[in-house]
Each structure stands twice: as C-alpha cells, then as structure tokens.
Image (spheres, rainbow, N blue to C red):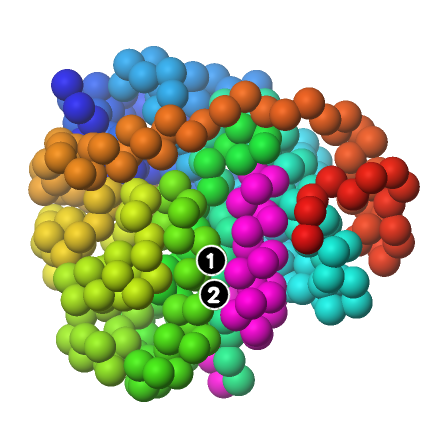
Amino acid sequence: MAAAAFITGVSGIHITADERAFLRAAEPWGLILFKRNIDNQSQVIALVNEFKSIVGCAEAPVLIDQEGGRVQRLGPPHWPAYPPGAAYGRLYDCDRALGLEAAYLGARLIAGDLAALGINVDCLPIADVPVAGSDAVIGDRAYGEEPAKVGAIAAAIARGLMAGGVLPVLKHIPGHGRATADSHRQLPVVDADRATLDASDFAAFRPLANLPLAMTAHVVFSAIDPVYPATTSATMIADVIRGDIGFQGVLMSDDISMGALSGSLAERARLALTAGCDVVLHCNGNFEEMQAVAGAVPRLAGIAAERAAAALGTLDRPDAIDLVAARVAFSTMMAGGQPTGARIASS
C-alpha cells in the first residue's frame, strides 16, 4: 500500500509503543527529526532504523534541518558545528569560485554526517532573499541579498548534499526573505508588487527548479493572493511555484503546526493538499495532533506519488571522498585560505 501524504515527528529519543502502533497504521511518507530526538550516534541510528522497519521501507525519507549556524539539530560534542549560510556569501564576495566550493564542500560534509546515521534528506538549501526591515527569522541563514548569488550558492549546496547520498529540500518556496514576521508565530503578509517579487524573491528559486523536493513558505503575497499563504494557496502554487518558478518536484508544506496557519490541524492539512502540496509536514511530535493529521490526508496517488517516487529515485551512493582531508580543506576555506589541490565544485 502507498504511504500516506504526510511527514511526521515523534516525541523523543525512542519511538514509544503508542507511536509505533500509530506509524504502523498511518504509514507516513517520512519522519523528521529535531533536537528532542537526538542523543548520540548509536541512538539516532537505532531510531532511524526502527522507523524504516515499522513503515516497511528501507528508503523511507528521514529528514532533518541541518543548515549550520543557529539551525542545526546535530552538533557538538558528537557532530561538528557548521557555519551559517551567510559565511558562504561573504566568502563568495571575495572569491566567487572559492565561495561556491566551500558551500559545496560544507554540504558534502553534512551529508557524510547524515548518511552515517541513515538520514537521507536535509531541509537545505535556503533560497530566501532578505531585504532591509525583514524579520530576523531568516537573517544569517541566507546566503546574500542578490538573487543570482543566492541561487548559485544554493545550487552548490544541493550538489554537495546529493553527492553525499542525501536529498536536498529547497526552502522556503517562493520566498520568506521579505517577510516582516516570523511564520513560526504569526502569518507574514508581503505587499510587494508582482514585478518586484519576480525580479528578486522568485528569481532566486528559478535556477533551482529541478531539485527533487521543496518546502513552502507560510507567507501571504498580497499582490497575487491576498487571502491565503503560499502553503494553502492554489493560485500561488499553480501560478508561481509550478508556473513562474517551474518547480516540478515534491512540494511539501512547512510545518502545519506553526502559528502562521489557522484552523484545526486537519483543516490545515486538507487546505495544503487541496491547494497543490504533495505532502504535508507536521513536526512537533504531539500525539493527538499527529493522529489528526493522519486522519485528514490521503494515500499518495497520481502525480504526487509519481513525484515522490522520482525524488527517492534520485538518491545515489555517495561519491568517493576522503572526509578527513575534506574537513581540513573546508576549515582552510572558511578561514579565508585557498585549499590545496583541484577545486571540488565547479563555478
């Protein structure tokens, strides 16, 4: 039987008996991990393997937000700390090729960390383009303020993840950078005109339209749809995300438990899927909410199932790389130096 059209969280470092029964019955397409689910390497491996065993799919998506900077669920002492996205942007400004190489290599190293745990999807890269006065929720997570630069660095990061056998999730399509509120807490409304959005916010995403997965922004773009945020807007998804930007991969919602959305969890899930999302994401591990979401979503079918299968079909074995040497080279790059040997990522 096909998986259901949602990604779920769980409550802690082990899957409880109730969660085990829920996962077996609901068969979510994927699992997303947060710091509450992380203790040490062997524990994460066991949790990931148990999830995949319960849903009966060795390639079931297991996601995490491992960006670097203030958004990384894995960190010291068991895993390395990575720089925020803005660090790649600063290096790019000094030396474009070196900035792209560093972005690629940082992502390749993150992929090595994740693949060792059985985690096969990273919610990265970010193509949001901040503007003056925007909320700090994106801030130094962004690679810069020029769409071409943001798109180029995001593409290098996506290549690095995929070279390490990890699928990238492009976020937050079609752009959270201009929002003046944090969608975790409230609904942002962007009043920029369509021409401005096309030239800036949306432009950063167009070069990335061939990526296998993307995550929506809980943001209202009043010039296009003054009522619904992109996640639940059929107009935004058809006209902008699938149309203008041209994204044709799996479209997943941002977390539907966030404060930007209104209505019950079931209503939010149905609205997102009806608008054109393929999969809904529910993150907080609240068992009652998990049940509500599961009860509201269908099984993956039709074009959504085809997209899901195609995304997983792009997973490949990691390329051969000396991770120890790569970490040394990465440290040299981020310190402003030039690594020895051939550059790893093309410009």
Q: SS for tag 1?
A: helix
Q: CA distance from mark 1 to mark 2?
A: 7 Å
Residue 199 screen position, x and y as percent: 43, 77
Q: Is residue 220 left or right of residue 336?
A: left
Residue 127 shows in the view: yes
Chain part drawn in magenta: 133-161
Q: Is residue 155 magenta?
A: yes
Mark 1: amino acid: Pro
Residue 264 shows in the view: no
Q: Is residue 236 left or right of residue 30?
A: left
Q: Nearer the viewer, residue 260 or 311?
A: 311
Q: Main secondary structure of the magenta part?
A: helix
User: Residue at (12%, 40%) from the top-left corner?
Assistant: 297
User: Residue at (54%, 21%) from the top-left corner?
Assistant: 317
Residue 120 screen position, x and y as percent: 47, 30
In this rendering, the count of numbered labels is 2
Q: Which residue is mark 1?
A: 207
Name the mark on residue 204: 2
User: Is disc 1 in contact with disc 2, using a CB cutoff of under 8 Å?
Assistant: yes
Task: Give above or below for 104 relative to 313.
Answer: below
